[in-house]
Amino acid sequence: MLITINNKGFESLKRFNIFRHIFAFVITAAVCIVLLLLSAGIPNSAIQKNMLSSAEYLNSKFVYYDLNEGIIASRIDHYADSILLNIANAYDSDDTLHSVMWSSYYFTTTQNENANLYDAVTQDLEPNQQYLRYWHGSITFVKPLLMFLSIEKIYILNAVIMAILAIWLIAELIRRKGYVPVAGMVFGLVSVAVWYVPLSLEYTWMFLLTFPAGIVALYLSDKNKREWYGVFFIVVGVITNFLDFLTIETLPCFIPLLLILWQEGKSDTGKSFKDTAKFAAKNIICFLIGYAGMWILKWVLASVILNINALDYVTEHISERLDGSYVGLENVTRAQIMIGSLTRNILTLLPNGFGLVGVLISVCILFWVIYTCFVYAKKSFDKNLVLIYLIIAILPYVRYLILHNHSFIHYFFTFRAQLATLFAIALIMNEIVDWRLHFGKKR
């Protein structure tokens, strides 16, 4: 049966898709906010024992320290974890809405955040410092968990969940005969020293989101649900902003996108660069709409509910991240910060992090990749898809340059965004290289 759709029908379908995207944003944001409010409403008496144990544990540690001396990739960040617990402790169960909007915590300049948390918990001190520019949505999980577990045990639980999700994603790739992508994913996870990630809550959330998002992306591609990709990336963008503390926020976008491009590239070859680029750009834009929209929603709601101009609390921090101004960097030029934001992140990757020997090993790996792609190249491959992979591989570095101040200072965790770069390179090799030739077999 032949079905025809006139121009009016296409316009109706277009409006329906726009409505579906808006509906996805609204519902996802609403669910996130309601869950956070419910979590904030848990009385502190229910978490008192584990909050005290957690405060004691964190206060016994340095704010920042390298678990393995001299390896920056092993640096543990308890600064953000102490603030997160401090905010959770300061939530007022009798006025959850206002306390969630303010996201205040106890702060002094005379001691570090670990000690501030300990004093706030042991002395029942009132919060005096707002942190309203973020949602701090991970408290949705952390505060209920504190009813049963201390932060040390939450770290262990996160490690177990993360391992299960990573293995699941790798198993899905193997099931689809994606052996080179599996190798790329494993190599990327090793390079970003993923085993240290669960030891800091701040590092964990983007991995706990990226792995299941990648699995869902593969299933959507299996079912050929192209009309749902935009909705999917909006939802992921909303959740990313809700959970993230400005760490590796690009990862939950790029890894699923690369998986979709790989999956579709196996059966839908010969697409023009324009079509492939439009497809990738549309999904990235949907992610950005969800991500930025959720941030704007926080500032708007805070302004209305608290009867303030939230932008007054936000603009100075945006400027700080973009213009390179930061305490301690007054004598460093913007050019030095921008170059440093690239070099610091690249050199923190393993094996680079093992010093000169590690860098030499990385150079050898790079030469092997280039050599293999040229010498064992297929007679024909999808050059347009390879170019899109290459562009996505570069995008984390664009992020480093745009937020150069942040990437320069916090390179010890922002470097993990390069997992997307390494995975994209593996997909490029998967597309270009004739592995039969590489292993000495005839075409």
Image: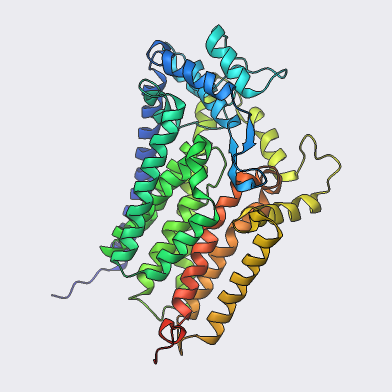
Image coords of residue 48 (percent x, y) = 43, 13
In this rendered view, identify the residue nearer to me: 238 or 152.
Answer: 152
Q: Quadrant of residue 149?
A: top left
Q: Residue furthest left?
A: 1
Q: Quadrant of the N terminus?
A: bottom left
In this rendered view, identify the residue nearer to me: 415 or 254.
Answer: 415
Numbered-mark total: 0
In this rendered view, identify the residue nearer to me: 221 or 200.
Answer: 200
Residue 44 vertical position relative to residue 426 in the rendered view, above or below: above
Image coords of residue 273 (percent x, y) = 49, 76
Q: Can residue 136 be seen here?
A: yes
Residue at the spot 38% in from the left edge and 17% down from the top edge: 42
Image coords of residue 95 (percent x, y) = 44, 13
Q: Quadrant of residue 116?
A: top right
Q: Residue furthest top?
A: 123
Residue at the spot 42% in from the left edge and 67% down from the top edge: 181
Q: Residue furthest right?
A: 331
